[in-house]
Image: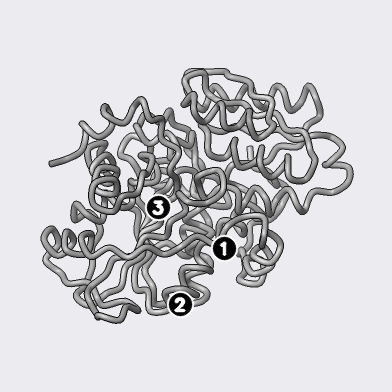
């Protein structure tokens, strides 16, 4: 199901993304752009190319990390959730809200709803990260745990929505959500106007569809590359089929574990995304390990997938290009860190 299934698919315009940026300003953070010599050197070693110098005084090669793991609630998700919640009608506000999530969207909707004085129920998989469940609860959500996979969770969410007449805040397949996530792309181009390649982790496709729509409308020559886990490739399957394809995602990157990509995200990815690459679990974990050891940044697996792909030569670059990798989240369960880091590719 999509949030606005009755709507005809259309573009998400730059005006909508800019309006979202104005709407959410002061409610979410404008995250920093982190530069890394060590990451650029690793790309040179693995890919045999030298990345172009960014806007730094010494002119050294740089790879940039858009630090969405430092966003409020620890991921990019509050951008879209806040944009959607602030556009609810009075009737929708009175009805109450419901959503489903492996964790990051749950926290984001709970945060956005609480800030607006609204009540929200969040349905999460039974095996969801305890840290993410606790965070969603702390932000004011009523959390319902159900199902072994996100697909089971989705079915339970639908039952509760119909029983209680609640308004569904979709995790990704909604133009208001996508426009909110597109503010990440807006900031990237504003802060790094010479960017040649933007690399984004992919779950249901809300982030990459919004980022690519913003980036391509501002800087058409910039390439936007998606990174999906091999065992959670909803967008790749959707692009091949031309419609959502259901699957049961199994990956350490639970934040990228969408049970399908949506109609909106597939259509926008077809318009704006240049390529989607698949990565294994070791590559994802290696992005986590590198970020922690060399950049002193703690990323969750979903937030590190794009970095892992870049560092391990899975994304093609050309000499002199300036690259931005979106670090989409940092909500990792600390108790699992040794296990996750041990998976890292050597």
Q: Which quadrant: the C terminus? A: top left
Foreground of the two, 116 or 230: 116
Residue drawn at (43%, 28%) of the image: 248
Dividing the picture into quarters, in which one does residue 33 lie? bottom left
Label located before the other in sequence (2 or 1): 1
Name above or below for residue 181 compared with residue 344.
Answer: below
SS label for mark 2: loop
Of the residues tagged 2 and 1, which is closer to the observer? 1
Residue drawn at (36%, 44%) of the image: 298
Name above or below for residue 320 compared with residue 122.
Answer: below
Name above or below for residue 32 compared with residue 61.
Answer: above
Q: Which quadrant: the N terminus? A: top right
Residue drawn at (18%, 61%) of the image: 43
Label located before the other in sequence (1 or 3): 1
Of the residues tagged 3 and 2, which is closer to the observer? 3
Residue drawn at (32%, 78%) of the image: 56
Foreground of the two, 214 or 195: 195
Q: CA distance from mark 3 to mark 2?
A: 21 Å
Mark 1 Cα shell of 10 Å, populated few (<14), some (14-19), many (≥20): many
Dividing the picture into quarters, in which one does residue 241 lie? top left
- In the picture, the disc for residue 183 is 1
Q: Is residue 296 left or right of residue 174?
A: left
Q: Is residue 198 left or right of residue 126?
A: left
SS label for mark 3: strand
Q: Position of residue 299 (x, y in %)?
A: 37, 44
Residue marked by disc 3? 327
Foreground of the two, 52 or 59: 59
Name above or below for residue 255 compared with residue 63.
Answer: above
Q: Position of residue 99 (x, y in %)?
A: 65, 34
Residues marked 1 and 3 touching at CB (< 8 Å): no
Q: CA distance from mark 1 to mark 3?
A: 14 Å
Residue marked by disc 2? 219
């Amino acid at each position: 199901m999509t949030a606005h299934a009755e709507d005809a698919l259309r573009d998400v315009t730059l005006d909508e993304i800019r309006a979202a940026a104005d709407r959410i300003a002061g409610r979410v953070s404008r995250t920093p752009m982190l530069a890394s010599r060590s990451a650029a050197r690793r790309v040179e070693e693995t890919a045999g190319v030298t990345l172009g110098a960014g806007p730094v005084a010494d002119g050294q090669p740089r790879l940039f990390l858009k630090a969405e793991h430092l966003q409020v609630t620890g991921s990019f998700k509050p951008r879209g959730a806040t944009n959607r919640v602030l556009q609810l009608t009075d009737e929708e506000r009175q009805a109450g809200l419901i959503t489903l999530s492996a964790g990051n969207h749950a926290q984001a909707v709970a945060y956005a709803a609480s800030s607006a004085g609204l009540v929200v129920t969040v349905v999460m998989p039974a095996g969801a990260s305890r840290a993410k469940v606790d965070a969603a609860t702390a932000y004011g959500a009523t959390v319902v745990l159900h199902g072994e996979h996100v697909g089971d969770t989705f079915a339970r969410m639908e039952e509760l929505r119909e029983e209680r007449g609640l308004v569904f805040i979709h995790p990704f397949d909604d133009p208001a959500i996508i426009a909110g996530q597109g503010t990440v792309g807006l900031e990237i181009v504003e802060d790094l106007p010479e960017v040649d390649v933007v690399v984004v982790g992919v779950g249901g496709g809300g982030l990459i569809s919004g980022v690519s729509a913003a980036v391509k409308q501002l800087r058409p020559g910039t390439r936007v590359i998606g990174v999906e886990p091999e065992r959670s490739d909803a967008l790749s399957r959707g692009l091949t089929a031309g419609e959502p394809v259901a699957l049961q995602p199994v990956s350490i990157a639970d934040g990228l574990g969408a049970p399908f990509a949506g109609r909106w995200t597939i259509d926008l990815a077809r318009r704006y995304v240049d390529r989607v690459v698949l990565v294994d679990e070791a590559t994802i974990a290696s992005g986590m390990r590198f970020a922690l050891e060399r950049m002193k940044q703690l990323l969750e697996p979903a937030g590190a997938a794009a970095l892992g792909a870049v560092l391990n030569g899975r994304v093609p670059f050309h000499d002199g290009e300036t690259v931005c990798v979106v670090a989409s989240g940092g909500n990792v369960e600390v108790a699992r860190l040794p296990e996750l880091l041990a998976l890292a590719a050597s």
